[in-house]
Amino acid sequence: MVGLPVTDLNAPIGPDEFSALMERLGPWPADSRLSPVAIAVSGGADSMALAVLALRWRQSIMALVVDHALRPESANEARLTAQRLSDVGIPVKILTLDAFPAGRMQERARGARFAAIEQAAVELGCTDLLVAHHLSDQEETVWMRYVGGSGPSGLAGMAPQSIRGRIRVVRPLLEVHPARLRATLLAAGVAWIEDPSNQNRRFERVRWRQDLTSGQRSAAHSMRAEAVRKRLGDDADLAEILAQHAQWHAEGWVSLERAGLNETVVASLIRLVGNQNYRPSRESVRRLLEQPEGALGGVLMRQAGRWGDGLIFIREERACEGAIAANSDAVWDGRWRYLGSEDGEIAGLREAASHLDARALGCPASVIRTLPGIWRDGCLMALPDLLDEGSGAPFVWAGNVPATGESVFDAEKDL
Ligand SMILES: Nc1ncnc2c1ncn2[C@@H]1O[C@H](COP(=O)(O)OP(=O)(O)OP(=O)(O)O)[C@@H](O)[C@H]1O
């Protein structure tokens, strides 16, 4: 069992202690108005404490408070939180979400919250966002994944830092007991909001939070330490194989030499090309590899033919997103960000790609069909600049899934 350091749970966190936690997660941008560090603040004790601590660590910070606008009192709560933050000198911006469709509410709210925070952070010049997950959250996460049958990648828990979209999400408090966060706020004389849903036993996390024994919490630490070790080893092996045998192409596809073929490699490439949150299960990859070709997770696996002695992995055309408005910064199919400002829609090239000379463009014809173009009234107005340098529409890769290195930059999705 991995023992936890014994700390006084009623001790506020001092500035030196917090700076030491932050140092480990650096480097940080210069402490200037032009590059503040963003903090996601719900108004609850944990994130309020994080904001208070961050202000003692550096001058240039920016609290982002999301009002989900799902309950009548939420606007007042966001205002109250913003007031409490500015009373202690923390700059704050409230982000009010638009209404979103009913169904899968928690998941949608989380997705919309992150999208709003990411957008605001980028506009404010922030590259890093602090969130307040703490030691107990980590224990509960690992335990829930253990109960759910997760392997090492799940049991490794939440990562201290992960890349999401255009920002780095940092969790400096993962080793801090929540009681100390409350003690920090009490000592600073800063109030917080108690969210009643944190006591609602309808939610699995709340039940575990209330019921986990200290033995189970300490077992969660041991499992996590073991899983992180295993993951680091697996990741190093994967990185070496990919470096030697796989090639990533600018159009968003991969070729893999036969010598680099194994289940883990294929799972990570499918996730990369399909921009999926998670790798497909080992079982489904095994089934796929029993066939010469096939589709999994929105990705086609084919014999490489002209492209080498192994396999190629390309986005599956029928899995691509439909048309979306061509707003600047819009992301189509989770993979391509549009940087232009034409009127119209973004949609896949599909049939319109059939007249292009794939051989001359240096990639499989079926890849070209899955690239985005600008459309107006059903007519293709512009190819992506990738295919038409000079007069094509500007698109850049927006997939946020790393092929390796997740032990450092985890694609954690539960902000
Ligand atoms: N409405 C929100 N606005 C901004 N950030 C949020 C919001 N809700 C959650 N977050 C961020 O996401 C983290 C995790 O959210 P979660 O709902 O698990 O925690 P919480 O119980 O709201 O935590 P806290 O006590 O810090 O407010 C929070 O610590 C906070 O950094």
Image (tube, grey):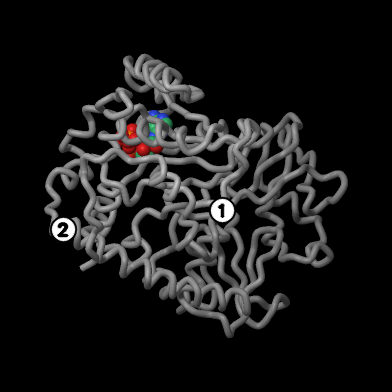
Placement of the C terminus among the 4 image quadrants:
top left
Q: Which residue is mark 1?
A: 318
Q: Position of residue 20 (x, y in %)?
A: 43, 50
Q: Position of residue 239 (x, y in %)?
A: 55, 72
Q: Secondary structure at mark 1?
A: helix
Q: Is residue 47 left or right of residue 404?
A: left
Q: Residue at x 35, y 27 (%)?
A: 43
Q: Nearer the viewer, residue 180 or 140?
A: 180
Furthest residue to the right? 390
Q: Position of residue 238 (x, y in %)?
A: 51, 74
Q: Is residue 68 left or right of residue 386?
A: left
Q: Which residue is mark 2?
A: 216
Identify residue type, mark 2.
Answer: Gln
Identify residue type, mark 1.
Answer: Arg
Other residues around mark 2 within 10 Å, as few (<14) / some (14–19) / many (≥20): some
Other residues around mark 1 within 10 Å, as few (<14) / some (14–19) / many (≥20): few
Q: Is residue 239 left or right of residue 150?
A: right
Q: Secondary structure at mark 2?
A: helix
Q: Residue at x 25, y 40 (%)?
A: 11
Q: Position of residue 208 (x, y in %)?
A: 17, 47
Figure check: 40 above or below 219: above
Q: Residue at x 75, y 32 (%)?
A: 341
Mark sitting on residue 404:
none
